[in-house]
Image: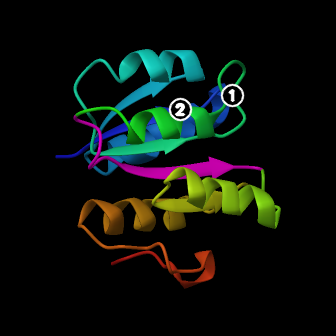
Amino acid sequence: MATILIVEDDPAVARLLELAFAVEGYRTEVLTSGGEARARLEGPATDLVVLDVMLPDIDGLAVLRALRGHLGWEDSKVVLLTALGADDDVWRGWASGTDYYLTKPFELPQLRAIAERLLSGEDLSGEAPSRIVETA
């Protein structure tokens, strides 16, 4: 089963994501800062990273750019999960190399469907969030 790295500084959101993915059978790891995430790049890559943008030290976009340039992590899928929903924020996320940009508040079934589709190899870069539906 796939491994999902969750980088989220809000403990309630981090726990929700951890439990939601664990129930689906995924292995999960939770980090709470950009610094922890950057350091984690020295370890084995994960299949998917759910990454908040507004982290207390190093922002998620900097982490994403580091991940995309780090040997061994090139194939890891990344979902930016953030409260930043302005057009320029979304553009910066895509330009930084995300595989999907999802704004908070979000629906958990939607995030699980996005994760499943990315992990199965689908390219979701052209899809609007409203087109992602839970898979049965």
Residue at the (55%, 40%) spot, across then down: 16
Q: Which mark is residue 133?
A: none
For the view shown, which residue lies furthest in the right direction? 86
Residue at the (52%, 67%) spot, across then down: 110
Residue at the (49%, 79%) spot, across then down: 133
Q: Is residue 132 left or right of residue 5?
A: right
Dividing the picture into quarters, in which one does residue 46 lie? top left
* Mark 1 vs 2: CB contact within 8 A: yes
For the view shown, which residue lies furthest in the left direction? 1
**SS under mark 1:** loop
Q: Which residues are magenta?
A: 72-83
Residue bearing the label numbered 2: 63
From the top left corner, tell me how far across and down residue 38 is, in percent.
47, 21
> Dot 1: few (<14), some (14–19), or many (≥20) neighbours within 10 Å?
many
From the top left corner, tell me how far across and down residue 53 is, in percent.
66, 40
Q: Earlier in the sequence, mark 1 or mark 2?
A: 1
Mark 2: amino acid: Val
Please tell me whether mark 1 or mark 2 is closer to you in this view. 2
Quadrant of the image containing the C terminus: bottom left
Residue at the (64%, 26%) spot, across then down: 11
From the top left corner, tell me how far across and down residue 96 is, in percent.
56, 50
**39 vs 118: above or below:** above
Q: Which mark is residue 55?
A: 1
